[in-house]
Amino acid sequence: MLRRMDIEKVLVPVSGNGVDSEVIRLACEIAEKNSASVYVVYVIEVDRSKSLDAADEARTMAAEEILVRAEDMARADGYLISTALIQAREAGPAIVDEARDGNVDLIVMGVGYRRRLASKPGEFDIGETTSHVLREAPCHVVLYRTPLATEDAE
């Protein structure tokens, strides 16, 4: 059972993978217990060879669809969320900046199970984005990973 904490704003970075809906649901449950708001962001990473504000219509449309699905899913569960689309060089620093600039109290992130090449059994890689957020976030961070069997099935 989730207990009340001093949380007013929850940031949820999404990427369009299968764990997004579960992470949004978890963030909304935490927010409800704390009378907090939920802010869902999608970061489009822009290659350094392009201008940071370079338009990529296909990626923007895909990102907007992911954010609309997030809003619809949350609304179906009785929650209202706000969303934003961000363009940045790297997702990790963009998420941390968004948390800092928005005075976020909690980041809730989904983590996929990634097998490393030549890894030891049971090891997994959380990726650069998650590692950066864990190192640099100015607030609490909750990581959520689905069971391995679920990840393998997707």
Image (cartoon, rainbow, N blue to C red):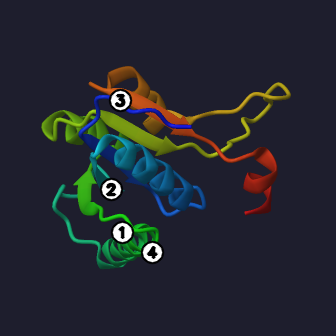
Of the 4 image quadrants, the one containing the N terminus is top right
Where residue 67 is drawn, which disc sits there?
1
Q: Amino acid at mark 2?
A: Val
What whole-number distance in Å separates the C-alpha atoms at marks 2 and 4? Answer: 16 Å
- Residue in view at x 58 percent, y 34 percent: 126
Q: Nearer the viewer, residue 14 or 105?
A: 105
Which residue is tagged 3? 5
Mark 1 near mark 2, Cβ–Cβ under 8 Å?
A: yes
Task: Tell me the tag on residue 40.
Answer: 2
> Disc 3 to disc 2, how far (Cα)?
20 Å
* Within-10-Å neighbours for mark 3: few <14, some 14–19, many 20+: few
What residue is rendered at 17% in x and 57% in y?
A: 51
Q: Give me the residue at 45% from left, 55% from top.
A: 24
Quadrant of the snapshot with the C terminus: bottom right
Residue 32 vertical position relative to residue 20 in the rendered view, above or below? above
Rendered view: 151 above or below 60: above
Q: Is 4 on the left-hand or right-hand side of 46?
A: right
Task: Provide residue 41's location: percent of width, then percent of height.
Answer: 31, 55
Q: Which mark is residue 105?
A: none
Sequence-wise first label, 1 or 3: 3
Regarding mark 2 in the picture, which secondary structure is present there?
strand
